[in-house]
Amino acid sequence: MGQSRSRSALVFLRVSRLIDWLNEKVGRIISWLTLLMVIVVSVDVLLRYVFSVSYLALQEFEWHAFSLVFLLGAGFTLKHNDHVRVDVFYQRLGRRGKALINLVGCLIFLFPGCYLVIKTSFPFIYSSWSMHEGSPEPGGLPFRYLIKAAIPLGFMLVGIQGISLFIRNLFTLLGIETDEEG
């Protein structure tokens, strides 16, 4: 029985590591978009305040890029435990106490929240894709529907990272070593 338990634990640990790897790769790729966004914002500010020139496409690119960074980088942020939270009680807890809070948080907030956003975003995205939605402003960017399609993708990345978080914290509660922080 102990050997089958360790095989099951190994399978779950491999799933967790695969999810971690995926979100790490996505996060590293998105970090380059962050650099590009900083450059574009700097150019936009320079053009606007030094040369009194403004381009709507540049401004829209800024919020498109920010949307992608926020949505697609959220799973990476969760992987690195960098999301904002109120740590009044959490910081005082031991490893098992934190693991329990994380498990309950995944079950009550993270998984249902991701599910609701993904489920409710599909009609919104379908409508955008069906009309090939672009910017309503002259000189704005086309393909707004592509940005909207990142909504369920981003929340899927957060949701699967939640699965990895859940697995690691469950192992902590069960006393199964993973050599990783939960």
Image (spheres, rainbow, N blue to C red):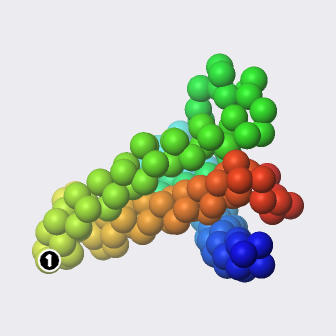
As displayed, is residue 101 above or below residue 68? Answer: above
As displayed, is residue 42 above or below residue 98? Answer: below
Residue 111: x and y in percent read 43, 54
User: Residue visible at 43% across and 60% down?
Assistant: 155
User: Residue visible at 43% across and 43% down?
Assistant: 109
As displayed, is residue 61 above or below residue 169? Answer: below
* Corner quadrant of residue 178: bottom right
Furthest residue in direction front, as rendered: 1
Residue 93: x and y in percent read 74, 28
The answer to whether residue 73 of the structure is visible from this angle is no
Residue 181: x and y in percent read 79, 52
Camera-nearest residue between 85 and 112:
112
Residue 131: x and y in percent read 13, 74
Residue hosting label 1: 130
* Corner quadrant of residue 18: bottom right
User: Residue visible at 51% across and 59% down?
Assistant: 158
Secondary structure under the numbered disc 1 in the rendered image: helix
Camera-nearest residue between 72 and 22:
22
The answer to whether residue 107 of the structure is visible from this angle is yes
User: Residue visible at 62% across and 40% down?
Assistant: 100
Camera-nearest residue between 2 and 112:
2
Furthest residue in direction right, as rendered: 179
Q: Mark 1 packing: few (<14 Cα in 10 Å), some, or many (20+)?
A: few
Quarter of the picture containing the N terminus is bottom right
Q: Amino acid at mark 1?
A: Ser
Asked if residue 54 lies left or right of residue 144, the reply is right
Camera-nearest residue between 88 and 177:
177
* Corner quadrant of residue 102: top right
Asked if residue 5 lies left or right of residue 148, the reply is right
Asked if residue 160 lies left or right of residue 142, the reply is right
